[in-house]
Amino acid sequence: MDESASRLTPLQWLIAIIAAIGFAFDSYVLLVLPLIVRPALIELLHVPPNSPALNDWVGIIFYVPAVAGGIFGLLGGYLTDLLGRRRVLVWSILLYALSALASGYSTSVYWLLFWRCATFVGVCVEFVAAVAWVSELFPNPKQREAVVGYTQVVGSLGGLMVTGMYYLVVTYGEHLPAVRGGHEAWRYTLMSGVIPAIPLIVIRPFLPESPTWKQKKDAGTLRRPSFAELFDVRFRKTTIVTTVMMAAAYAAAFGAIQQTPRIVPGLAEVRTLPRPAQEQIVSAVQSFQEFGGLAGRILLAYLAVHIVSRRRVLRIFQVPGLVLVPIVFAVAATSSLSLLQWGIFLYGVATIGQFSFWGNYLPRVYPTYLRGTGESFAANVGGRMIGTCAALLTTQLANVMPGASAPTKLAYASALVGTAAYVLGLLTSFWLPEPKREELPD
């Protein structure tokens, strides 16, 4: 590839499209859970919507798959450096697509938990493999920043797609073929996660391996990745700081924004409506969040190319987000549907936009032989295993928070956990290392 090239070749377009599809369905299969967890658990547990058992299982179903994804995602990052980016990428997408299909046939809450764990494993591995793969396929720094940034923008389209899919199956699900003798919208929505496997099977033979990784592998100069090396003097600060900051970013999402679908039915304008109407409004509010996330990712993609300082780029999202958390969840989420819709849009801009930051930043701070391993440690140990425990923390705090109803208590708990996550992320950003150069480390 000519490093001075400004236009993408057909092959590069194909690569960008496949990466974008992967990022989109990463978001799709993860963001399906906030929408379906309430009706799914009500059916599988045979409990009323206000049952304490429901709240306990929501925390479990959010957190346990994230831990499984973090553990196996860490291994996946190692295998990405050892076996190649493309191979791991393809198998990870197939894993999360097929397990998403199987989850729609769950007969108990334990089977739903098992298949969500498998889905999460695929997503965690795919993100690391895709970021390393795309970054190394575009050697021109400006082009790389733009491609990585804008392919991640499509991740928010995945959130919009799942919101639209849920609305459609809630409205028209009775006309679809029965699944396990019924027409439950949550089952159809989960099963739709199989879609990305279809184009992948067709296109896979045309996808190249990373030339950077392949050249070193063929020449016998590719060093073996090592988790221990992440903590030697060259990478220790980067590893620790990025792990803490990704934990904070995921905590802001899982501890607050992903609790919104269970908060909405408690609003005065919603609580008296029949269940299908409530679920339609939940879907509508979720769309505001996803449009906000889309705007945040587009803004990040633009700023990543035009602002040199990585800390400055990140704080453009962190500072407003810190201000928004208590306003959105402690005030808007307990008083007004319209205020919550616009508040969650802005919170989506600030919170979801940060996820694209790490896809641009992490490849620039680790060398080729350690790139997948370093990315996976920050994303999976920090983000998935530590950060997502905020969902469990929020659901447990909701049991003891003040408030007249369960959704109100959940809103206050979300405000508390989200604020703490933003404070941690902003403080830690003062130690975030700036990349030494625009080119990827060799």
Image (cartoon, rainbow, N blue to C red):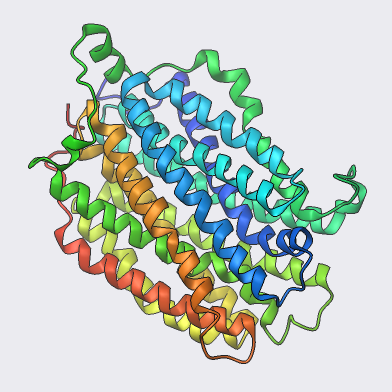
Residue appearing at x 53%, y 72% in the figure: 395
Above or below, 436 relative to 241: above
Residue 179 in the image: above or below residue 210: below
User: What residue do we see at 62% from left, 92% from top?
Assistant: 404
Whether residue 395 is visible here, answered yes or no, is yes
**Percent position (x, y) of residue 335?**
60, 88
Which x, y percent locates residue 243? 28, 52
Q: Please identify the quadrant where the N terminus is shown.
A: top left
Tell which of 5 and 304 is nearer to you: 304
Quadrant where the C terminus sits is top left
The front one of 6 and 41 is 41
> Considering only vertical position in the picture, is 122 above or below 339?
above
Residue 188, image x, y percentages: 77, 47
Is residue 348 something that shows in the picture? no
At horizontal 62% and vertical 62% (from top left) the residue drawn is 287
Quadrant of residue 251 in the image? Answer: bottom left
Residue appearing at x 27%, y 26% in the figure: 139
> Hey, which quadrant is residue 2 in on the image?
top left
Q: Residue furthest top?
A: 219
Query: Which of the 4 image quadrants contains residue 170?
Result: bottom right
- Left or right of residue 159: residue 393: left
Viewer-closest of 13 and 47: 47
Up/down of 335 relative to 206, above or below: below
Whole-percent x, y for residue 297 in the image: 43, 53
Q: Is residue 365 left or right of residue 135?
A: left
